[in-house]
Image (cartoon, grey):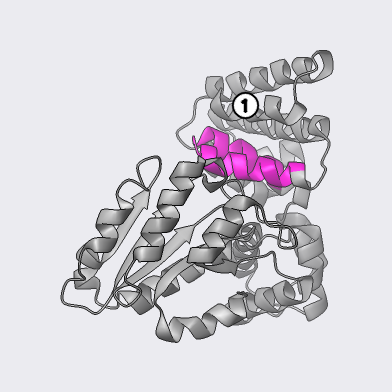
Amino acid sequence: MTVTEFKKELKGLGGVYLFYGEEEYLKRYYTQQVRQAAVPDEGLAVFNHVKLAGAGALDGLEGALSTLPVMAEQKLVEVRDVVYSALKAEELKNLCRVLGEADAGQNVVVLYASKEELTVQPKRPDAVSKALFAVAKPVEFALQTPAKLAAWIKKHFDKAEIEAEPELCFYLVSYCSGHMDMLTHEIKKLIEYKKQQGGGRLTKEDVHNVCCRVEEIAAFDFANAILQGNKARAYTILCDLESKKQKPQTVLANIAAVYGDLYRIKLLAGSGRSKKEISQALRMHEYRVGLYLDALRGRQAADVTRRMEACYQADLKIKSTPLPKFGLLASLIVS
């Protein structure tokens, strides 16, 4: 089922839906749409929106599906953080039995699977995918085409009353990313920047001054996710870089460069330099300096130094050992 087809499904929800695919932004958005349609009374959401996650999620699923909705016709059962591809044969069989026996009239079930938790090859689905497809309505949230993304981007700028030519919206996709989460971040930066400039027409120069190229976005987001302890976000970015055939040495160099900038900005800010003075000293746009300062808020310089040392050790191992290169980068997430 495509996203377009699922929009029609929202008018009469029922049964089990498997959300899978690479576009996390759309998965989150439509999970919220399901919530609004299936559990319209917020006062009853504590009873009628059951959230199951992690290792014990499947253990509680049968009980959650057997209970009746409270003062409503339906309840929503949302299941997250289950690595379906790693389920044992008996676990998968039991899961499919429970889902197959669920009352589709009173239950709306969303199995939310990230790309790491379930990878589906449409032309040659594996045994896990086939089993889940037999008991759930699969909804694929694929990456959007540049044309769709450009139109979506333009709507954001139109709403903010900022003039953006369609050609520039296409350019933003190629310059930044084809992922809606990353684009959302860059769009917000541009809107805020233009408002500070008094509005007006968006230009390529604005994009170059404020936005990061796709590899810079990934490196900054990766480093920032590690600093924040957001391992899931960091791992998602890393998998995306690997799928795009990025060289691990290049990925590591970009990440190390981000930490280098973070460290220099931290030291300059600690010496009393203003954002403008830091911008001039590093020849970095003032707006981007502000983004780095936000990422550093509450962080000690020693923390960034430790991350730089971890990058150095990872670089040595990448160059001197036969260990999987991206596996070594993944170790940065948990170091």
Which residue does the image show at 49% across and 82% down from the upper left?
Answer: 9
Q: Quadrant of the N terminus?
A: bottom right
Residue 233 relative to residue 283: left or right: left
Which residue does the image show at 78% across and 80% down from the upper left?
Answer: 166
Residue 250 included in the magenta stretch of the image: no
Classify mark 1: residues with Cα within 10 Å, few (<14), some (14-19) or many (20+). Answer: many
The secondary structure that dominates the magenta segment is helix
Residue 297: x %, y % from top left: 48, 37
* Nearer to us in this view, 21 or 132: 132
Q: Quadrant of the C terminus?
A: top right
Question: What is the total number of numbered labels drawn onto the structure image?
Answer: 1
Please give the residue where the numbered disc 1 appears in the rendered image: 332
Residue 10 seen in the current view:
yes
* Nearer to us in this view, 7 or 246: 7
Which residue does the image show at 70% across and 80% down from the upper left?
Answer: 163
Residue 139 relative to residue 81: left or right: right
Residue 173: x %, y % from top left: 76, 65
Q: Secondary structure at mark 1?
A: helix
Residue 311: x %, y % from top left: 69, 22
Magenta extent: 218-242
Residue 223 included in the magenta stretch of the image: yes
Q: What amino acid is at disc 1?
A: Leu
Residue 263: image quadrant is top right
Check the image and report above or below for 85 versus 144. Answer: above
Residue 55: x %, y % from top left: 40, 40
